[in-house]
Amino acid sequence: MADPRQIRIDVITRLLEDEAYFAWFLRDPDAALAEYPDLDPRDGRLIKREVTDRASLENLARRFKVPIRSAPSESLISPSRGDSVKGDKVKMEEVGPEADEEPPQRIVSTGFSAADIPGQPLSSDTPLLPNQSYYFWLEVGEPIAGSIEVTPTALPDDLPPKARLQVVLYDFKAGIEQIRPDDVGEIELQENGTVKVIKPVAIPDGLDDPELVERRLFFPLRTSPQNGRYQLRCNIYYQQNLLQSRLITFYVQEWPRRMPNALISELDYVLSRTFDGRTLSGMGQTRLSVMLNDNGNGTHGFRFFGENQFKNDAELGEGELTNLIEMARGALRKAAWGDEKPYQAGKTYRYNNPDADRLRADLITFALRGYRFYDALINRLAGDADKAWELADLMLKPGQVQIASKQSARLVIPAALMYDYPLDDGRPSSQYTLCDTFQKALQDGDPLAETECFQGNCPSYDQDTVICPSGFWGFRHSLGLPVSLDEAPDAPSEIPVDGDVTLGISVSTDPDLTLRPVHEQRLQAMGFEWEYADSRDGSLEMLKQIEPELVYFYCHGGLQNDMPYLSLGKPGSERFTRASLRNKRIRWRKVRPLVFINGCHTTQLTPERALDLVTAFVATAHAAGVVGTEISIFEPIAVTFAEECFRRFLIEKETIGDAIRGARLKMLQEGNPLGLVYIPYALPGLHLA
């Protein structure tokens, strides 16, 4: 059987030394790598993702210790993927002693060690003993012999000066006992390129090298008394933004026998493989990060990490979670068209005109559903009851919130509808009132974001029969639900702008979309560069040719044969599907745009089904993120929300999290709460630069 490591080395070596093959790879990476049918698919994805020019190829070679031959200085300007490649010969020469001057490596290594020999990593083929003390460890630096990482991941050289990363270990409430479950480890990136532990979780006794604790984090734990397969989750955060998550799997055996992958660490959620300094700096400070994970046993786990190193987790059964999600969306549907069933043709929009009584009734329903969701989650928090109040206090002030969901977790949490102010939910609707401060601001036309309620100081906070819209996460916080995919590049925190902002718009020409012409005129009046398509084929051709900052779909959508699609041009025309992007080889390289989908009158297209389109834009086309909706929307929502969001995001240069919050509040100011239907599948700090 072929050695996968050797095949990986062979491919990288050929890319380094065979100029024609490298040029072919840059033009068509899939075809070039097809010459190596035994190449591990994970290695293939890694090489395609990381190698875009000669410099990135050499970085990858250093990571895997492949000998590098460098070109003379006049040849160092190498083509990148997507550029034309000339056939001139490049003279190669061995790298000499100057290689010793390269910056230190920043490879993330993890593993286990016995409590009595903490400095010696256990081999990955060694199961752990039951009811025994061990350390789980993590170190960033030169590769560590005994690391259990499946795919070694490196930190680059351009990180923010003295950046601090938090390392958090979560268990699955079975099979493992963390000795210090509330402790968080912290590492700092030094100016000389090394990584230093500045906050250890534990300092083991009996280390042969006492200085090891300055490089390596140790998490003490005790295994289950029962044989079996168990798991941990190790997350790395920067300013409460979840960057990477590893699933640690290990076997416990009373009579251990060597076995492949007895101890293994798999990087299964990643927004930043390279920890690019510009990306990290642009993320901004996040108040709370929540990771949703399918535990594989009929439950879903929520991993919390927030300011002041708040750490906790909770579990909900899949049936309970699905029911809570459906109840939340049912409230949004009822507000939009009068009943809780999915949209069908003929439904009538309820918010064409302001109506104070209707707004009050819908906000009460939203709050009751949102509070029950929040309460169900908070009740499952591990530890004592004070954790619930600690989280409530943490979330009181406005801030960024990141909802991170693994690719395998197919449920989309309606985070915007979460309501966390005290609420007595056992009363009839007639006994609830709206916050006086909010109502006065609405009547006087005062900007809601500037009122004390939306700054975390609502005077009605402790009155549990008074509902204030500032209690909803979507009105108080800047939310983001970034997508993590193996084949996608790092999630960017900024979109570079060179000159005027370009908007690529694709539309349905259905005459029933009566607001479209005026909507287009108002968008053009904002002064953007304008590229336009009114058919599926025209849209694909446009998207292949341009590098816009924002891609906008104003259209219908639906589901056919379990396949989500967008409907552009005339009704009944060809459908825009996820495969359309790959078929036309659409991949944005220089500028990775935000994709905004305003799907009016869509049928059967839930967020879970729409994820297929979202992931295609991110993984295939390399979009920076996608904005979609929880439910089908009507034209007045689409027009009002998009125009305000674009003004804030493209002209005022607000982050997408702030722009979406601002657009929600503008609609609320006009008596419409349905801005809560929008979902940003992107980092909340994504912005134009």
Image (cartoon, rainbow, N blue to C red):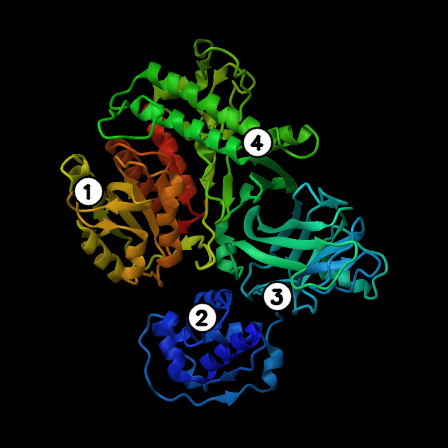
User: Counting residues from the N terminus, which is met first, the one under dot 4 or under dot 2?
Assistant: 2
Residue 402 place in picture, x, y as percent:
50, 43
Tag 2: amino acid:
Val
Q: Residues within 10 Å of mark 3 (few under 14, many from 20)?
A: some
* Lateral position of residue 414 relative to residue 161, left or right: left
Residue 518 place in picture, x, y as percent:
17, 37
Q: Secondary structure at mark 4?
A: helix
Q: Residues within 10 Å of mark 2 (few under 14, many from 20)?
A: many
Q: Which residue is mark 2?
A: 51
Q: Nearer the viewer, mark 1 or mark 4?
A: 4
Q: Residues within 10 Å of mark 1 (few under 14, many from 20)?
A: some
User: Counting residues from the N terminus, which is met first, the one under dot 3 or under dot 4?
Assistant: 3
Q: Secondary structure at mark 2?
A: loop
Q: Nearer the viewer, mark 4 or mark 2?
A: 4
Q: Marks 4 and 2, Cα distance to the nearest angstrom?
A: 42 Å
Q: Residues within 10 Å of mark 4 (few under 14, many from 20)?
A: some
Q: Which residue is mark 3?
A: 107
Q: Marks 2 and 1, Cα distance to the nearest angstrom?
A: 39 Å
- Which of 102 and 322 lies nearest the eye of the viewer? 322
Tag 1: amino acid:
Glu
Q: Marks 3 and 4, Cα distance to the nearest angstrom?
A: 36 Å
- Give the number of the disc on residue 377: 4
User: Counting residues from the N terminus, which is met first, the one under dot 3 or under dot 2?
Assistant: 2
Q: Marks 1 and 4, Cα distance to the nearest angstrom?
A: 42 Å
